[in-house]
Image: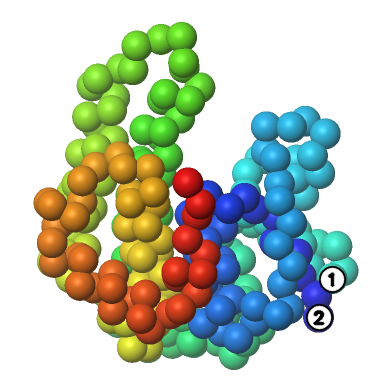
Amino acid sequence: MGMTLRSVDPSPFGRKVQLAAAVLGLTDQITIEPADAMNADDSIRRQNPLGKIPALILDDGRALFDSRVIIEYLDTIAGSGRLIPVDVDARFSALTTAALADGILDAGILIVYEGRYRPDQEPHGPWLDYQRGKIERGLSALEAALPPIEPVTVGAIGAACALGYLDFRKQVDWRSRNPGLIGWLDAFAAAVPAFDETRPDG
């Protein structure tokens, strides 16, 4: 089985998929192919009509998106229940943490886009504050209920990628606000070497 992951290096959502593949032992089955979602000629717009990354292209040509669906697919083919637990309580705890992490990422990306796609306009302060508020509340919730690292779940992967993205783009200074997350992230990186291996450049 051969799969192609359409993504870009800085994408935290693509990074989530790479970490999931590493934990599941599927890295060797996935080829990473850069995608330019802003280029109308890039095939990503046919593979995902929304023109968003990541998308996973299966060996029969089918495309799966987004990261939540891709990770569930990888978990299924590797033997369901490794990243998304079977036990009801553990399952929905992991999925809720994953949703929280995705929300933090969404807010962080919107902050980046405010400057990137409106370069000729003054950033809208109330909008930025609104997004930072989501991030700060989300981080406080994560710090109050740290996701388990053993075994690694989809929730822990999402949380680690959210923190990594905030380190990369610096939308908030989470390390001074949420010091309890620092040790957790260090422990995650030690347990999942692919976290450091997929760290974005820049």
Identify the residue under disc 2: 1
In this picture, residue 29 sits left or right of residue 97: right
Of residue 168 and residue 18, the one placed in the foreground of this image is 168
Classify mark 2: helix, strand or loop. loop
Q: Residue at x 43, y 80 (%)?
A: 192
Residue annotated with mark 1: 59
- Residue 180 in picture, x, y percent from top left: 13, 66
Local packing at callout 1 (Cα closer than 10 Å; few below 14, some 14-19, many 20+) is few
Q: Residue at x 57, y 68 (%)?
A: 18
Looking at numbered disc 1 in the image, what kind of residue is underneath it?
A: Asp
Picture residue at 82% right of the left edge, 34% below the top: 41
Residue 111 located left or right of residue 28 = left
Q: Is residue 98 visible?
A: no
Is residue 164 depicted above or below 105 in this figure?
A: below
Q: Position of residue 200 (x, y in %)?
A: 50, 54
- Residue 15, compared with residue 42, is above or below; it is below
For the residues bearing labels 2 and 1, Cβ distance under 8 angstroms: yes
Residue found farthest to the right: 60
Residue in the foreground of this view, choosing between 20 and 47: 20
Question: Which one is earlier in the sequence, the residue at label 2 or at label 1?
Answer: 2
Tell me the quarter of the image containing the N terminus.
bottom right
- What residue type is disc 2 on? Met
Residue at (45% x, 69% y) in the render: 196
